[in-house]
Image (cartoon, grey):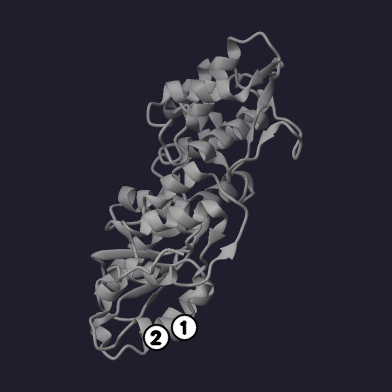
Amino acid sequence: MTPAEHMTAFLAGQTRSRIGFDLLAQAADAGDSSLPTSVLRRRILAGAAAQLAGAGILRLPAAGGRGWDLSAEPPLPLWVERLTPRRARTQRPGPRAWVEPLAFAAHLPLSRADLELLSPINDHLRDHPDAEPVPIPERSYELYGDEKRLARITTHRLVTAGLLSINDHLRAYPSPAPLAMYELGPAPWMLIVENSAAFTSLRRILRGWPRREEVGWLAYGGGDHLVASLTTCLETFEEREHPIEDLLLYTDLDLDGLECAQQAAERAREAGLPPLVPAAGLYGPLLTRPPRAVSVADAGRIRTAAAWLPEPLAARACEFLPQGEVLRQEALPKPRLEQLLCPDQTLLPQLRQQQSLPTPR
């Protein structure tokens, strides 16, 4: 069961209308032993709450009001209101028959919206049982005349319950926007850079590197886009017959950048890519630069996110980030990057290996 389903089961046993969200969170934790320690716990809980609100199972506090915990991102409600479910008007399929893969539909109380979703899928499976899988938007356009109709299909209750399969029933698959990546040389490594300015500077430096055989791939991406698109690089490696053995990431030294790095590292592991590691040779010099002030972030989240960095980089990040200071990549401009990357030395070790850290500020 998903966190949203555990929350729904908990709500079903309640009689009060207003319920503290901490109780729903505890119900989700109890159903998944890995959730309490997950770095994505807050995001997962927020997504489950939004899913239940969208399904009409509960009502969230007014946006921007006092009913929200704003101590970290994303915000979480302090309480929810349990909604009494209205009886869904059911519409049986009548004389039409469900194909065997969708036989479960004959035993469910289907709403009109359910039938509008399932009927075209049923017809397609009946007429094209061996259809070639295509990207989800293409199947959506074919079945519903709307390429965005299935944009959120992965969160539909029939999918999360394990009844409706995107692969087996829709004969479709996700098609995230590709990772922007450039083959600057034949070396078997790739460096991913979060910000466009740092990417542009590094691209110009690496393009002029005196020994081209030491240069590999350079990619640009950050945030949710990086996490979603990371797996698309596998096809590019195959097409170019240029696989990699080392995968490095260089982000801002802030909470968002480090949390993104952890999520991307997990996605890389799931996809069978080489371990995604910090470009420590760039992070160290970044720590010598003047920080900028931002809103103070939660210290617990910072410690968890900074664990992606090796020591002593992680310890240093935990010194200044809780003080409301961050270091953006723009603080290490092209002239300093050129001084840092010495053409007389092998390139990859310079990107991977830490240099001596500055004295703490």
- The answer to whether marks 2 and 1 mark residues whose Cβ atoms lie closer than 8 Å is yes
Around disc 1, counting alpha carbons within 10 Å, would you say few (fewer than 14), some (14 to 19), or many (20 or more)?
Answer: some
When asked about the image quadrant of residue 12, the answer is: top right
Hey, what amino acid is under mark 2?
Answer: Glu
Hey, what amino acid is under mark 1?
Answer: Lys
Quarter of the image for the N terminus: give it: top left
> In the image, is 311 to the left or to the right of 110?
left
Taking the spot 58% from the left edge, 36% from the top edge, the residue there is 46
Query: Is residue 65 positioned above or below 299 on the image?
Result: above
Where is residue 231? Give x, y as percent.
38, 56
Which mark, residue 338? Answer: 2
Where is residue 22? Give x, y as percent.
57, 24
Q: Nearer the viewer, residue 116 or 259?
A: 259
Q: Nearer the viewer, residue 259 or 182?
A: 259
The residue tagged with tag 2: helix, strand or loop? helix
Query: Is residue 127 positioned above or below 7 on the image?
Result: below
Asked whether residue 108 appears in the rendered view, the answer is no
The residue tagged with tag 1: helix, strand or loop? helix
Which mark, residue 334? Answer: 1
Taking the spot 38% from the left edge, 54% from the top edge, the residue there is 315
Spatial CA span between label 2 and label 1? 6 Å
Where is residue 67? Give x, y as percent.
71, 31
